[in-house]
Amino acid sequence: MKPFTTHTGIVATLNRANVDTDAIIPKQFLKSIKRTGYGPNAFFDWRYTLDGNPNPDFELNQQRFKDRSILVARNNFGCGSSREHAVWALVQDGYQVIIAPGKDMGEKSLPAFADIFRINAAKNGLLVVELSEDQVDEIFGFVERHSGLKATIDLVQQQIVLQVDPPQVFEFEVEPAIKEQLLKGLDDIAQTLRYETDIARFEENHDPLGP
């Protein structure tokens, strides 16, 4: 997995809440035993018309979002089933960062991202960033006013910098364990292999038939 330190790219907006994993990658594409080829099918039912052509009414098909790599959406992104294919599809479609807002509702709160989606994202090098609703509204406004708007996401400093005049900076928090995982580019196998010596020592000394 490639380490994530900073990324600069075009920002696209998807003004929808509760985007579930079936919307990100529909179930008919889960039959493959490979982990590749999902990118063109991301958001399939929204992205294409029934005859297979790009749907001009789908936000992300706008020409100004052609080379986007940063996606800003609404609450509860990645809800639904736990399929890791959703993250694979997003990454293979060119996204490196997903931004969404959390919402405090008193006793309850509406998350920015579903928990399992957040975990799957970290495993695959996809940075998910939670901001407030007001901050996400601001970003939506900047994207609307500035075609081809670029942003730099700095994981070390935990900042989003919109490339406007003057630059607009948004601070964010990332769990320390996930931050380290992304900065070092450690997937589950790589994290396990960090303890390869300890595992080998245990296997050498452990008697599975012992008392």
Image (cartoon, helix red, strand yellow):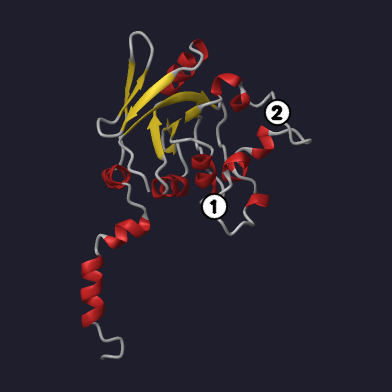
Please identify the quarter of the rendering in which residue 199 is found: bottom left
Q: Residues within 10 Å of mark 2 (few under 14, many from 20)?
A: some
Residue at x-position 45% and y-position 14%:
142
The residue tagged 2 is 55
Residue at x-position 46% and y-position 39%:
113
Please identify the quarter of the rendering in which residue 159 is found: top left
Q: CA distance from mark 2 to mark 1?
A: 25 Å
For residue 91, say whether it is visible.
yes
Residue 20 to residue 154: above or below: below
The residue tagged 1 is 83
Residue at x-position 28% and y-position 31%:
158
- Amino acid type of disc 1? Arg
Pick the residue in front: 162 or 78: 162
Give how far across and how far down residue 128 sits, in percent.
41, 37
For marks 2 and 1, the one nearer the N-term is 2
Residue at x-position 53% and y-position 53%:
35
Q: Residues within 10 Å of mark 1 (few under 14, many from 20)?
A: some
Discs 2/1, front:
2
State yes or no: discs 2 and 1 in contact (Cβ < 8 Å).
no
Q: Which structural element holds mark 2? A: loop
Asked if residue 19 lies left or right of residue 2, the reply is: right
Question: Which dot marks residue 125?
Answer: none
Pick the residue in front: 72 or 33: 33
Give how far across and how far down residue 30 sits, in percent.
62, 54
Residue 77 to residue 14: above or below: below
